[in-house]
């Protein structure tokens, strides 16, 4: 019986780490996955590690949890719902969860699975993204997707059992070209690939984080500190 080169993390392990991070921000919030799968949970896991990075750079006491149906109340949700499919940032079809923080007095939001409109006019979904709170509010008010220059950071999450194919690096680089003014983009995976790493080394291409999984605390720490440094330089 052959063993996959990069075994997928267990669903329970991913959800447990998401719970730990959310609980540290708001002890009364539980996580709920619309799609109870490893792939969906992996995006939530990366979201939680991004929150850990944000807490290193954010203004004091500014990191919080919010939800689509309680924006006006500015209160954390009792259940943090992670989308199971791409959707509109302004959608309140469910009480989708997101995070907020401030950096140098400017408000930002962190979302899972929302769509952005590229410079081509085509809608693209990103697993995890950051945008200014002001722009997010404008999208809700005008009922439209954020434009190509609105995102501050974009993350594509890939949970694979085998090595990453070079086409993933090319696809994400092509996708990033529709958002040329976004300062921060990163392909994140539990897997690895020398060819993708080599391809993404060139300047202006997305960065790559590999071997990121709950059983690899060294890579988790490396990811958190690398993203925190990048946020300091790009926000």
Image (cartoon, helix red, strand yellow):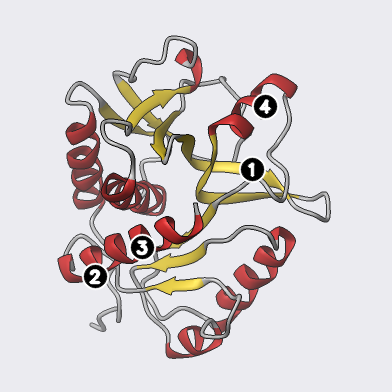
Numbered label attached to residue 138: 4
| Element marked by disc 3 | helix
**Residue placed under numbered mark 2 in the picture:** 219
Residue 226, picture quadrant: bottom left
**Label 2 SS:** helix
Binning the other alpha carbons within 10 Å of mark 1 as few (below 14), some (14 to 19) or many (20 upward) gives many
Residue 23 visible, this orientation? yes
Q: Earlier in the sequence, mark 3 or mark 2?
A: 2
Residue 56 image point, x, y percent: 26, 50
Residue 229 disc label: 3
Name the spot of residue 138 as percent of width and height, x first. Answer: 67, 26
Residue 83 visible, this orientation:
no
- x 44%, y 35%: residue: 105
- The image quadrant where one finds the N terminus is bottom left
Residue 157 circle label: none
Circle 1 residue = 115
Disc 2 residue crowd, few under 14, some 14–19, many 20+, Cα 10 Å: some
Q: Nearer the viewer, mark 3 or mark 2?
A: 3
Under tag 4, what secondary structure?
Answer: helix
Of circles 1 and 4, which is in front?
Answer: 4
Tell me the distance, in whole angstroms, between the alpha carbons under discs 3 and 4: 28 Å
């Amino acid at each position: 019986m052959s063993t996959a080169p990069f075994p997928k993390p267990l669903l329970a392990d991913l959800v447990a780490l998401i719970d730990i991070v959310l609980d540290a921000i708001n002890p009364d919030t539980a996580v709920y996955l619309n799609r109870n799968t490893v792939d969906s949970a992996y995006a939530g896991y990366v979201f939680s590690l991004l929150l850990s990075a944000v807490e290193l750079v954010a203004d004091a006491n500014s990191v919080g949890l919010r939800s689509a149906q309680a924006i006006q109340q500015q209160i954390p949700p009792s259940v943090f719902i992670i989308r199971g499919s791409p959707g509109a940032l302004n959608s309140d079809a469910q009480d989708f969860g997101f995070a907020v923080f401030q950096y140098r007095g400017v408000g930002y939001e962190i979302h899972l699975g929302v769509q952005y409109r590229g410079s081509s006019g085509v809608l693209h979904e990103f697993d995890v993204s950051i945008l200014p709170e002001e722009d997010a509010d404008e999208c809700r008010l005008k009922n439209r997707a954020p434009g190509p220059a609105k995102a501050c950071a974009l993350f594509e999450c890939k949970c694979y059992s085998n090595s990453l194919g070079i086409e993933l690096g090319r696809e994400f680089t092509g996708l990033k070209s529709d958002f040329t003014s976004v300062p921060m983009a990163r392909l994140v995976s539990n897997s690895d690939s020398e060819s993708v790493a080599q391809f993404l080394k060139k300047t202006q291409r997305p960065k790559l984080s590999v071997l990121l999984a709950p059983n690899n605390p060294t890579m988790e720490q490396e990811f958190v500190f690398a993203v925190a440094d990048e946020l300091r330089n790009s926000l």
